[in-house]
Image (spheres, rainbow, N blue to C red):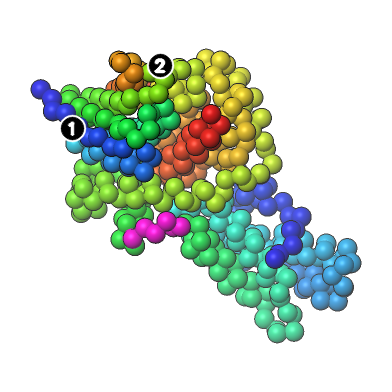
């Protein structure tokens, strides 16, 4: 197991993902600091606070590398922030395993570890229900086509338009949309229960003040713990859709993911809440 | 003129996929954009979940899909429920439904609960647009 590291991962991935590292920004100063930190880690015993501080700083220093690598996988149906999170786990593993004696640059060593962790995420979480490869590819094509056609016309495409655009039948499009749902059914199960800092209270408070019509709704009591168990992004999407009346496309722009992804997250979140409410009865 | 598509599924979440896919096909036939279509799918999920929660064990859900030439789509889901009462409308689930479709109403007849969803190709303009 990898020890937790006190790195502001949440801050880094929240709303303002910094620009990927460029050669101009990764200058001699950073490279020099990297060497110092690696030297500290190699020479100071693990239980020495200085070792931990060096480890933390080394991880922080390379977060832009994780973001850069995660972006290469961004169009494959998993949210970028999740990829950054798992990539960061890879980075931490790389920091812990790096052996300066081998004479390779740290980033050279870390890159395959980070990429490996991201790929493992796709393998483990992405398609836990076996979805045929053809459907997986269809779903990805549909996502891309939806984004492309939406961009062009300023509205979401119809099934017929998607079929024409992709050169497939409408039935296949329908099948692909259903496949997308099967996919989402699992991808979120893995995340349920995650506690990421801002509790459900903030959402419920926000809901209450933003939509007085819903003051009387039972969500305040019975829904609160269920909302709390949802990842914060899913809570936000639910609020934007059902309490702020935003469309899926508007939410997609706001949150920075595709409309199809918004749809999947909504479906999964509602299913989770429904199950929770039923279990409570 | 309109044609209805009728489907009966066991009142179990395992078969809701059939209602959802039928709804999808109706939306496609009516040229809904995918966003509207996804809303309808979510609504069918939600209603099915609501009915399954109250359905008499071992009973079925009757689904009637009625697409109209003018782009309107009615979806009526009916189940025999143990309570025979109308669903509460001050719930989160109901708030979700009203946000997803143009109109949603529930009726009870001899312990059979029907939830009717009405939606259309041309969404009512968003309030804040």
The one of B54 and A114 positioned closer to us in this rendering: B54
Q: Give the answer, above or below, for where B114 lies relative to A11.
A: above
| In the foreground, A36 or A30 | A36
Does A151 sit left or right of A100 as displayed? left
Q: Earlier in the sequence, mark 2 or mark 1?
A: 1
Q: Does label 1 lie on the same chain as label 2?
A: yes
Q: Which mark is residue B5?
A: 1
For this rendering, which residue is in front, A61 or A24?
A61
Label 1 environment density (alpha carbons within 10 Å; few <14, some 14–19, many ≥20): few
- Where in the figure is residue B74, as x and y percent of width and height? 25, 24
Q: What is the C-alpha distance between the residues marked 2 and 1?
A: 26 Å
Q: Position of residue B41 (x, y in %)?
A: 34, 36
Q: Determine whether A41 is above or below B95 in the image.
A: below
Q: Residue at x 61, y 44 (%)?
A: A193
* Chain to which mark 1 belongs: B
Number of marks in picture: 2
**Quick check: can you spot residue A52?**
yes
User: Residue A238, can we see it?
Assistant: no
The image quarter in which residue B87 lies: top left
Q: Main SS type for the magenta part?
A: loop
Q: Nearer the viewer, mark 2 or mark 1?
A: 2
Q: Position of residue A178 (x, y in %)?
A: 32, 46
Residue range (magenta): A127-132
Query: On the image, numbered disc 2 is attached to which residue?
Result: B85
Q: Horizontally, is A27 left or right of A39 in the view?
A: left
Is residue A179 depicted above or below A212 in this figure?
below
SS assignment at label 1: strand
């Amino acid at each position: 197991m990898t020890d937790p590291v006190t790195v502001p991962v949440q801050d880094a991935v929240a709303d303002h993902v910094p620009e990927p590292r460029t050669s101009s920004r990764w200058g001699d100063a950073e490279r020099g600091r990297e060497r110092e930190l690696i030297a500290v880690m190699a020479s100071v015993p693990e239980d020495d606070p200085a070792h931990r501080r060096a480890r933390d700083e080394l991880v922080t220093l390379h977060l832009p590398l994780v973001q850069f690598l995660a972006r290469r996988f961004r169009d494959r149906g998993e949210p970028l922030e999740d990829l950054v999170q798992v990539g960061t786990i890879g980075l931490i593993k790389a920091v812990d395993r790096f052996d300066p004696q081998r004479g390779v640059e740290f980033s050279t060593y870390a890159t395959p570890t980070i990429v490996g962790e991201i790929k493992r995420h796709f393998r483990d979480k992405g398609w836990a229900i076996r979805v045929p490869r053809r459907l997986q590819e269809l779903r990805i094509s549909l996502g891309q086509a939806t984004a492309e056609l939406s961009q062009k016309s300023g509205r979401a495409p119809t099934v017929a338009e998607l079929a024409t655009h992709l050169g497939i039948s409408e039935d296949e499009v329908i099948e692909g949309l259903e496949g997308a749902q099967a996919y989402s059914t699992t991808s979120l199960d893995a995340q349920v229960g995650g506690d990421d800092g801002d509790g459900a209270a903030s959402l419920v408070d926000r809901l209450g003040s933003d939509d007085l019509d819903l003051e009387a709704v039972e969500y305040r009591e019975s829904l609160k713990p269920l909302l709390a168990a949802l990842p914060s992004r899913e809570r936000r999407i639910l609020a934007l859709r059902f309490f702020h009346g935003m469309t899926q496309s508007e939410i997609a722009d706001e949150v920075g993911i595709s409309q199809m992804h918004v749809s999947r997250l909504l479906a999964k979140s509602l299913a989770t809440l429904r199950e929770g409410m039923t279990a409570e009865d | 003129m309109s044609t209805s598509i009728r489907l009966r599924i066991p009142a179990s979440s395992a078969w809701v996929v059939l209602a959802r896919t039928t709804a999808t096909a109706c939306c496609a036939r009516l040229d809904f954009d995918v966003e509207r279509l996804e809303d309808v799918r979510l609504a069918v999920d939600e209603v099915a979940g609501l009915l399954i929660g109250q359905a008499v064990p071992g009973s079925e859900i009757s689904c009637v899909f009625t697409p109209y030439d003018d782009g309107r789509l009615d979806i009526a889901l009916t189940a025999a429920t143990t309570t025979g009462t109308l669903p509460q409308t001050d719930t989160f689930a109901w708030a979700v439904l009203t946000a997803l479709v143009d109109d949603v109403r529930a009726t009870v007849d001899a312990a059979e609960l029907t939830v009717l969803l009405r939606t259309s190709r041309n969404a009512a303009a968003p309030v804040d647009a």
